[in-house]
Amino acid sequence: MLTFPFPRPEPGALTRVADGLLWLRLALPFTLDHINVYLIEDNDGWVVYDTGIGDQATMDVWEGIIKGELGGKPLKRVIVSHYHPDHIGLAGWFNRRFGVPVSATLGEFLTAQILCVDTNTETFANVQAFYQGAGLDLDGDQMTIEYTSGYRKRLSPLPLRYSRLIDGMHLSIGGNDWEVITGGGHSNELAMLYCRARNLFLVADQVIAKISPNISIFAGNPEEDALGLYLASLKMLRERVSDSVLVMPAHNLPFYGLHERTRSLELHHDLRLDALLDFCRNEPHSAVDCFPKMFSRPITNYHDRRFAAGEVIAHVNYLYLRGQLTRVTGGDGVERYRTVA
Ligand SMILES: [Zn+2]
């Protein structure tokens, strides 16, 4: 059983989760209405792990905390787990406003940079073709907005310099050793931080209690085995990280029970894979046809439909790449999958 040692704090409130380790819950303007970020005390200052989204409300919360609860100690570094806007959103602001250096993996920082500058109309056409292949007819106007400014407007401009994190690297923070562990599937090279001596583990979105991290395929890398990468990372975490750690995720509550949670996430995906194989056994189906087999709630709005298509494709890619599904493109341009007998 997972256990949750801390109650849910109010947005903007700091909770001390261990000596020299603070948890800050920040509001988000989405259905997923909050993100957890963390501060590690580093002798005469603080290291920030993830920043919140790049909006004024989040900056205001940080300004208040830096002047108030952090006791005037400076921020020494921002470590960004991955490129999603709720994690990297204020990295550039911290860098410019306070002169704080920013660390991230190459895979995450470059992805953020590319998404900030790519307004190429060819990219848009490629995205449209990708979703058409999934059987999804998306509102072209909404897609244009999203693919020309949707990502960039949720971030303060990225810092011009960053320092690269690599899997297996060790950082000394506050006299403690923190190992960088990277995982794929949810994003390219998500950086987690593990303090073995103190049983503390910052995981961002890689392992979350109660919700399953989004594992999606996007138009720029349509053949990717994102689910295979994700499942491999769950197995790797059981091998490299003790089961007794306090897991500190970016959403929901910190918890104990890392290994159990990785196994239940594996089971969740196994059940979805089995459901798809059953569904596609007698006749071929598109990604959109598969929505009711993967999701219990109706998928209606633009964002949900786009994310749902990406998630289904992550699962069909997994099966296709392992020879368990065939894929045929119809005269209508839609790709349909059939279970191999
Ligand atoms: Zn994320």
Image: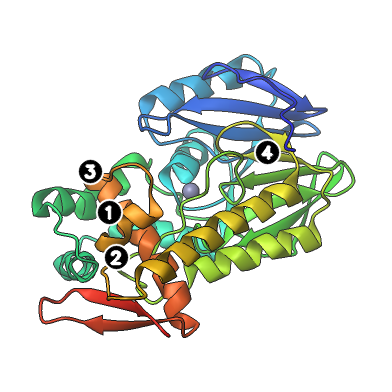
- Cα distance in 3D space between marks 2 and 4: 33 Å
Given residues 53 and 248, the one toward you in this image is 248
The residue that disc 3 covers is 300
| Label 4 close to label 3 by CB (< 8 Å) | no
The residue that disc 2 covers is 287
Tell me, for residue 306, which label it has, or none.
Answer: 1
The disc, 2 or 1, on the residue closer to the chain's N-terminal end is 2
Q: Tell me the element at label 4.
A: strand
Residue 72 at x, y = what percent? 67, 20
The residue that disc 4 covers is 248
| Label 2 close to label 1 by CB (< 8 Å) | no
Density class for disc 3 (Cα within 10 Å; few <14, some 14-19, many ≥20) is few
**Residue at image x 22%, y 42%?**
301
Disc 3 under 8 Å from ligand 1? The reply is no
The disc, 4 or 1, on the residue closer to the chain's N-terminal end is 4
**Residue at image x 55%, y 54%?**
268
